[in-house]
Amino acid sequence: MIQEKVSSYFERYPDLKILFFFDENQEFLEEVKSLAIPHIHLEFYTDSAFTTKCKLLNELIDTKVLLYLPMAHPNTQDEYHRFPLLGLLLANKELKLDNVGEFMENYGLQRHQKALVTKYMKELKYSGVQMVCDPILTPYGFEEPALQRGLISSFLKLKIIESWTLIISKILTLLVAKDDSELNKVLAKIADLKMQDIIIQQVFENTSYAMKSLSRQELMQAARCIFYNKITQTITTVSNLDPYVSFKIKDQTQIVRLNQLLNETEINTHLSSSFNDVLKLVSNDIKGDKLIDIYGLDANFAEFSPSMIWAVINSLQNQIADAPEAVIKKLDNISIQQTLDEGMRNFLKYLTHLAKLHQMVNGISSYILNSPEDYLKAYSEEFYLIDTLYRKAIKAYKLIDYSELNSNILLDDLHLALNNRYEAHTDKLNREWLKCLDQFEFDYSKIPVAKQFDFFQNEIESLNQKVVVFISDALRYEVAHELLSELHGDVNNTAKMKYMIASIPSKTNIGMAQLLPAGELVYNNGDISNSTISTEGLPNRNTILQKFKTDSLAVQYSDIIGNSQEKNRAIFKNSVVYLYHDIIDSTGDKRASERRIFDAVTDAIDEIKRLVKKLHGSLNVAKVIITADHGFLYNDREIEDKDLESISEPIPLTSHNRYFITPTKSQQALSYSIPLSKTTSFKDDVFVTIPYSVNRYRKQGVGHQFVHGGGSLQEVVVPIIESSRKREEVVSKVRPSLINKGDLKVVSNILRLNILQDTKVSRMEKELSISTGLYNNNLLVSNEIISILNSTSDSPSERAVRVELTLSSDTPKNAFLKLKIFDVDDKLNPLIEERVQNNTLIQSDF
């Protein structure tokens, strides 16, 4: 054993010259005499210290020496001073045959610390424990409280000695481990070192729960206490009916400690997810529906647990159609929470879109307006939002996981009501719109609005700068509004939008033909020509464009995306480029894929936004005009065959599910038959027939949910977006405001507030990055939250940001502080400055 120890010392300490070995009782003398260690000289101390010292400093000066001393190690101060070889001892090492002694020597610990080392040596001997505890393994840091914290941190496989708050959180996360083996192992180690009372005390100090023992059952109770107070700490008056009242923390200081634990855990990336799993586990025991029943829907809960949210939804679901305003307000309050999982957040979005659709339809006093211009104005300014809400509700609905749905939620009834309401709205709106248009004989010349057949003349012909005309097939007006908002998200973009009215029938070949330079358009039973040149295909369109301007070109979106940057630069040097994009129509026109139409809409918005940014940024195009050939109607509920209308004409020239064309006026029931020349620039003497409203004609082999070709507002109102990098005015940033202004209080060391982005990001108002914090005069006394206000949503609730500020532990005990919100680019002049009452200083009334 001694030989291995000696060799180990000299290996670990290459500069070591003399290794002292004190053996008072000479019990190791014979073993030492038998040592034969290469390159290490064995020297026995005699009574002549002078002789030994001279030999070591002269004859053995370049030799590694094991010096055997048949005497006691000097232990007292006097013995040290009397030891004749003290200088050499201090400059070298002493052979320790016990682990405690070796450990103390390795870390330079003092003799008075030996008892503490001995007490915990069974754990300190492990290298993993030593790595965690290394910062305190010094003569000045080796204290029992710090060591206990370090040991427990190492048991929990933490990398460093953590605070008690994070240690408690980590212990609690073992409750959701795949089995109890890790928890049992940690609890056994703590028990072996008799540190249970320390953990119990720290749990009490941080959660206010007095554990009876250190066990899984009691840790679960502590977790329940944390969860209950996390959601109810702002409830000031406790009900006797509350079955969980025993968990209620009544001491303000302990609430502060609990919030510190929650905040420290939330920002710890290694703990936050599993700790939330613990809270989710115990949330099954703290019944949210009971809390809602006891305290009411309007109680001031700090936040809502999933079970509470389901209880709220259950109470509100029957009010969505008749009292949507109150429903929206409550849903917005819940949705602003940061802790919602994706599934719950999506379901709340679905309900919010549903309630807003009902709200908007409820607000329509009459569908009968005075003129076609009134209908177009109403649709382009307000009614289009109903189509957007329907689209977003359907998208959210398709993401709902039925397995996670509360059994009390009548989703099928809610969704049926959504489809019924939307279908009734589109039917009534378009029935009256088309009736009004009929009073004007469907004569577009009598309607003083922009028409699609004048597009080139009005928008392109007079331009003296390079332009890209981005034509996205079936990009209906409401979708373009969302695209516009996305374009506004680019701080360098100054896009603006208007509308024009597409022709009837609202079909691709007619719309595409009328967007080209004006010529003599001939319908010729669908084989359309422009001054004898077919309007189908890129080569023909190139020819038509180049008759107007020689450096013009027609290209496909797919080709541009696949091209090299060099090739695209050459293409966009042309004065006029018509860029054709087709994802919405190509998806919707196929029966197999029409139900994916709203996913295609999302993809279309993203593709157009990205390419427009590229056109402006790297391809040197100053102006891009985005438009469409037509819009579309879509009903998510499958349209049954019995709801389709049969075409009575025996042999129409052309027919589809929303129109048919005949050489003479049709007598089709419940339909309008109008000359094609009334809504187009074609002179052909044919008639187009469309349904009275949004009905579909029976057509074999095609889908009937996604349709176009008729005269509904959704089909014929098409967008014109002008996107430019030229700044005509000074662009400002959006402004923040406080939703709960005037009632700002720090409670339990925390200030929770909601910041509203007043307006959506637009052409003239761009995103704003803000810094939010609590200040004592000019000194920041809380965490600083950086938020980016860049929402392009029309909905105020979707532009709200929830902020949670926590006072630092050394905050001065002031009754009032200042909330300050700055533009991050200007930290001198606050955008918002409000006085905040520091209720953390006020004792609880309990």
Image (cartoon, rainbow, N blue to C red):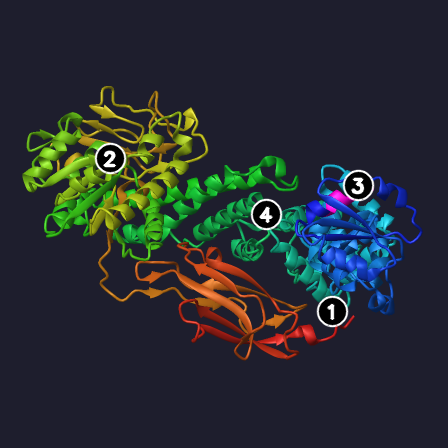
Confirm whether residue 367 shows in the render: no
Which mark is nearer the camera, 3 or 4? Answer: 3
Q: Are marks 1 and 4 in contact (CB under 8 Å)?
A: no
Q: Which is more N-terminal, label 4 or label 3?
A: 3
- Of residues 488 and 512, the one nearer the viewer is 488
For the residues marked 1 and 3, what is the alpha-carbon distance in whole angstroms? 60 Å
Provide the secondary structure element on which disc 2 rests. loop
| Amino acid at dot 4 | Gln
On screen, residue 719 above or below 583: below
Q: Which is more N-terminal, label 4 or label 1?
A: 1
| Amino acid at dot 1 | Thr
Coordinates of residue 427 in the picture (x, y in percent): 38, 41
For the residues marked 4 and 2, what is the alpha-carbon distance in whole angstroms? 52 Å
Instruction: Read off the residue under disc 3.
Output: 3
- Of residues 108 and 835, the one nearer the viewer is 108
On screen, residue 825 above or below 381: below
Q: Which is more N-terminal, label 3 or label 2?
A: 3
Which mark is nearer the camera, 1 or 2? Answer: 2
Instruction: Read off the residue under disc 1.
Output: 253
Which mark is nearer the camera, 4 or 2? Answer: 2
Q: Which mark is residue 563?
A: 2
Q: Which mark is residue 317?
A: 4
Q: Which is more N-terminal, label 2 or label 1?
A: 1
315 left or right of 767?
right
